[in-house]
Structure formats: C-alpha cells, structure tokens
C-alpha cells in the first residue's frame, strides 16, 4: 500500500497535537509541526524513494529520531510512538484543537474534568451548560464553542488542495497508464484551485470504459467503492478522500470537462445563457434541437455561447461571464511572472536553513531577489530578533550580497504589530531596513473596531511596507480577524503600503475575494512564500492559485517587478 508524504505529515501533526495537549516541551511540539510541514510538501515521494532502497534525502529539521520515524511510517504505515500516545489520550481528542479558541490547555481541562474527548461530547457538554462552569471558560467561551461547532459541520472533511493533490495526482497517473486512455483530467474545485476540496472529480477519455473502471475500483488505495456503473463510479480512498470518476467519449470531452469543473453556479449561468440563445447545454455538448454544435473542447463550448474560454479559477459566478462577454478577461498571473519573494525566515528565528542556503535556494527557483524577514523580539518562542541581533544580521546580509551573484537579498523584518498598533522594534532600527513587513501574532479576538484601529495605526508607521498574512486565518484552526477590511485596504492605498498573499497552504491569506478588492482599490499584493526552509519556495504555486482566483494579473502583484523598479517602491516617503 503506497504511503504518501501527506500520510507521514498527518501522523507527525497528530503527534504534535497529542504532545501539546499533554503539555510537552513547546520546542518538541514545534519540531513535529515543522517536520509535518516540510515532509508534507516535500517534492519527492519519500516512501517510494525508500522502497527503491535509496537513502532518505537530507531534509532540514529532520534529525536522526524523526528520520527513524519516517522509515517506520514509510514501511508500516504506522508509528509506534503515536500508538503509544493514543494509549494515554483518545484518538478523537485532536478534533477539539480545530475549534477556534480551544488551545491545548483548554482541551486538556475539558478532558480531565468533563471527560470530553470528541466533537460530539463537546457539543453535548456545551448544550448542557457544563462548560461555563469550568475555571477559565465562562459563558462567552461556551457560546463561541457552539457557534464554531455550527460552522464546522459544513467545512469538515474538506482536504487542503496540496494534500488532495498527492492522492489525486497519483491516482490520475495510474489511470493514464491504462491502455487506450487518451486523457485524464482532475476537474471540480481542484481545477478551480480552491484552497480546499470536498472531493476529487476525475474525467477520463477512452474508447472502452471497462478497463478504466476496473483499474479505478481496483486501485490499491481504495477503501470503499460507493457506486459503480459502466461509465461512472465513486470510491473513498484510505485517507478518507472521495473520488468521482466519469469516462466520456472524445466528442464530448470539452462539455464534460466544463460541466464537472463547475462551479455549479457558473454552470447554471452558462446554461441560462444557452437557453436564451435557443440552445441546450449539458455534459455531452451544446445542442440546437437534436444536433450537437460543440463539445469536443472547452473552447468550442464557450464559443458556441458567444464567449471566450474562461480560466477555471474565475468560474465562480462572480461576474466572469458578463465580463468575458464585454471584453477581454484579465491575463491571470503565473508562477513564471514572479521575480522575487519578500518574506522568509532563516535559522536566526524559526527557519531551518542558513541565510546562504535560503539565498541559493531562491536563486535556483529562478528568483532575482529575496527579503529576509525574521520574527521580532516579542515572539520569544521562535527566537524573534531584538535590535542587536537584527543589526548583526543586516551586516551578514551586506557581506553575503557582496559575494553572491544572481540573487539580491533585501534586509527586512516580520515585525509584530502590538495590541495598540505600535511595532515591536524601535523606529531607528526599522528605518535602516529595505522593507518592514508587519504581522499580527496575538490578540486575535479584539472587537472589530479596535482590531481595525490597530491595523490602521500600524500602517501609519513611516517605515511600514507590507501587511503580512493580513487576516491571520489558518485553515481549520483560526478564523479571519474581525475587522473592516475595505477600510484597511483603502488605508493601504493612501499610505502607499501593500498587502501580502502568504502562500503557505494553511494560510493562503489574503483570501481570493479580498485580492480582488485590493486590485479594484489599486493596492498591490505581494505573493510571498513565508519560507521556513529551502523547500518552501515551492509553496509559491499555491499562492499563485489563490491570486488567480482573486483575478490578479502580473501588474497587480508587487514582486513581479524587476529589482530596479521594485527598490524605490519599497521605500516609504509618507
Ligand atoms: P467540492 O467537491 O465541494 O470541493 O466542489 P466541486 O465544485 O468540485 O463540486 P462537486 O464535486 O459536487 O461537483 C463537481 C462539479 O460538477 C461542480 O463544480 C459542478 C458540477 N455539478 C455538480 N452538481 C451539479 C448540479 O446539480 N448542477 C450543475 N449545473 N452542475 C453540477
Ligand atoms: Ca469535487
Ligand atoms: Ca464530486
């Protein structure tokens, strides 16, 4: 049974969750979280490498102990350490950590005092009013828990796109190898680059569907076959991901691809448009009466409706059809448009690699510049830099810049925005940097007016350049800050600052809809990796997906500018 990097990552994540609930050393917890992230997004399939008898590649942050655990998981699918932890804490308890506001200490208290160890228990305890009685909880927490549980039912069981990618791409490759198969395409929300996907929709063309169906339902990761017909089937993979498959003839490939790419709302708008023109649109083609007039390609389907082809990321019924009818759609940004990256960490704070390693890795990814932006002093947990350490790093960067060719390092900082909007380092130090990115890492639940005032005040700082991961949301973990985002975006324009789109799969923050508002308001977005290791530059593709969903073009993005053009844009004059 193949083990994907995402499976290893999931086990490390769970270990980190359980250790955290047990109150283990925070550095140990962090080591597992970082390992989960690096392994989960590692470019090559580790289990496959090991199965071929190759050595485990050098991965930053993975020492001998974690390497041993990777070997064990890769060969058995399990971790004996995790099993040991499960003897101490029930398996379902980690679900509780995904309720906003429930940190490890609160989860432990709920378990110790109320025997709550699952979401069902949590709901029952909250509904019975038992949670408010625990010390440190109160009525407000209880209400927040019930609200969070109500929201959670719709978003639960969605997979992050980069995780789904590992399972879906492997399955697609297996189907491509079936004799007679001409095309395999992953459609649905995956193709639209949504940050999470509910299930995978696979579309295959082949003259004979039988061998495809046999390979699909017999795939070794299939845990359950939900339904099976001649040309369609649905299965659930071992990891819990559902996959729907359709096999279609070449002549209706384009129509089927358009239909199963969706979104549903986009499809409905297209179908109404077809009806208004006396046509019929379905997954087999576009028909006038009984005659098919289009269907083999997506372009032909859109053309039959009087439209240019619309990129999948725009198909959310957010005005794309009207826009396409009136004039050209935006030429969406691609990864190749990025000239640099303005947010990363090194060993000096919580990164895994040295300055030089990060610089060389960025250069090897085709980037011309890279900003080094460590955390600031308030974040002790991650060795945030104080003035003295930052000044020392600035000297190191000068030395490295003098020596390196093909890449320029910018001196920056990811400075904490304090509760009152002040920045966590003195002005005279911030003023010596090439750029200052500011970020919220605390006080996530201020009342909206206060939160807004905090961010506006931070931007008023004369050296403030970019607001990092603006809403601070983390998928499945933390909701976006409550604040007046339109006002913040307009303030950024007035102050000449920029907003970041952080490409980490958990963040993808700025969100797509706000990217579009930023564009309309004339505020440039910086698509950054927030890299904590040399591998994380690969995350930029996820940020690009989100940016495309936000209608961004090369012109709308700050770090598509060549070096000479960018430099003066970073300097604040106001
Ligand atoms: P997901 O899986 O929840 O992340 O989102 P999708 O968009 O992949 O949705 P899914 O898997 O239920 O269906 C795939 C596509 O099939 C969807 O985007 C549009 C199309 N589709 C599904 N149901 C309907 C429907 O009732 N009407 C129309 N017009 N299209 C549908
Ligand atoms: Ca889907
Ligand atoms: Ca589906």
Image (cartoon, rainbow, N blue to C red):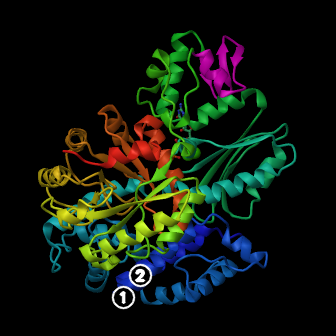
Q: Neighbour class for label 1 at 10 Å: few (<14), some, many (≥20)?
A: few
Please provide percent x and percent y for residue 274: 55, 16
The C terminus lies in which quarter of the figure? top left
Element at label 1:
loop
Total numbered badges shown on the rendered structure: 2
Marks 2,1: beta carbons within 8 A? yes
Please provide percent x and percent y for residue 540: 51, 53
**Mark carried by residue 25:** 1
**Stretch of the chain drawn in magenta:** 280-305
The N terminus lies in which quarter of the figure? bottom right
Was residue 299 drawn as part of the magenta stretch in this picture?
yes
On the image, which quarter does residue 240 sit in? bottom right
On the image, which quarter does residue 277 sit in? top right
Residue pointed to by mark 2? 29
**Residue in the image at 46% along x and 31% along y:** 265
Frontmost residue, 61 versus 102: 61
Residue 487 drawn above or below residue 24: above
Please provide percent x and percent y for residue 523: 31, 39
């Amino acid at each position: 049974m193949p083990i994907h990097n995402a499976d290893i990552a999931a086990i490390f994540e769970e270990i980190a969750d359980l250790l955290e609930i047990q109150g283990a050393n925070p550095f140990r917890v962090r080591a597992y979280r970082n390992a989960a992230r690096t392994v989960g997004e590692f470019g090559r399939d580790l289990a496959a490498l090991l199965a071929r008898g190759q050595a485990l590649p050098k991965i930053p942050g993975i020492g001998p102990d974690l390497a041993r655990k990777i070997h064990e998981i890769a060969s058995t699918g399990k971790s004996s350490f995790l099993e040991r932890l499960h003897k101490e804490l029930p398996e379902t308890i980690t679900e509780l950590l995904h309720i906003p506001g429930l940190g490890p200490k609160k989860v432990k208290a709920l378990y110790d005092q109320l025997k709550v160890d699952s979401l069902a228990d949590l709901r029952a305890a909250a509904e019975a009013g038992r949670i408010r009685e625990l010390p440190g909880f109160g009525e407000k927490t209880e209400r927040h828990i019930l609200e969070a549980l109500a929201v959670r039912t719709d978003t639960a069981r969605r997979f992050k796109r980069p995780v789904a990618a590992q399972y879906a791409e492997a399955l697609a490759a297996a189907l491509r190898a079936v004799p007679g198969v001409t095309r395999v395409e992953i459609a649905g929300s995956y193709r639209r680059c949504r940050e999470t996907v509910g299930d995978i929709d696979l579309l295959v063309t082949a003259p004979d569907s039988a061998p495809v169906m046999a390979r699909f339902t017999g795939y070794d990761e299939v845990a359950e076959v939900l339904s099976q017909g001649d040309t369609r089937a649905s299965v659930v993979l071992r990891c819990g991901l559902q996959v729907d498959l359709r096999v279609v003839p070449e002549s209706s490939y384009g129509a089927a691809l358009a239909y199963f790419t969706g979104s549903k709302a986009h499809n409905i708008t297209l179908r109404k448009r077809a009806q208004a023109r006396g046509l019929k649109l379905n997954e087999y083609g576009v028909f006038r009466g009984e005659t098919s007039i289009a269907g083999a390609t997506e372009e032909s389907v859109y053309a039959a409706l009087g439209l240019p082809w619309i990129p999948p990321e725009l198909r959310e019924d957010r005005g794309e059809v009207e826009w396409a009818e009136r004039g050209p759609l935006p030429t969406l940004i691609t990864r190749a448009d990025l000239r640099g990256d303005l947010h990363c960490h090194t060993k000096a704070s919580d990164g895994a690699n040295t300055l030089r390693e990060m610089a060389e890795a960025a250069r090897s990814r085709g980037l011309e510049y890279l900003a080094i932006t460590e955390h600031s002093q308030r974040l002790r947990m991650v060795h945030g830099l104080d003035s003295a350490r930052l000044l020392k790093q600035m000297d190191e960067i000068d030395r490295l810049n003098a020596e390196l060719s093909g890449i320029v390092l910018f001196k920056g900082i990811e400075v904490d925005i304090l509760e009152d909007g002040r920045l966590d380092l003195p002005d005279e130090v911030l003023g010596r940097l090439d750029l200052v990115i500011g970020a919220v890492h605390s006080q996530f639940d201020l009342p909206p007016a206060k939160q807004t005032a905090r961010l506006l005040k931070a931007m008023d700082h004369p050296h403030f350049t970019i607001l990092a991961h603006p809403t601070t949301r983390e998928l499945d973990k933390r909701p976006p800050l409550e604040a007046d985002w339109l006002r913040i975006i307009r303030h950024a324009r007035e102050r000449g600052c920029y907003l970041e789109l952080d490409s980490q799969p958990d963040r993808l923050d700025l969100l797509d809809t706000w990217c579009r508002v930023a564009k309309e308001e004339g505020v440039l977005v910086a698509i950054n990796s927030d890299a904590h290791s040399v591998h994380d530059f690969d995350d930029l593709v996820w940020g690009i997906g989100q940016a495309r969903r936000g209608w961004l073009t090369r012109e709308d993005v700050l770090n598509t500018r060549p070096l000479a053009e960018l430099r003066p844009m970073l300097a604040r004059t106001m």
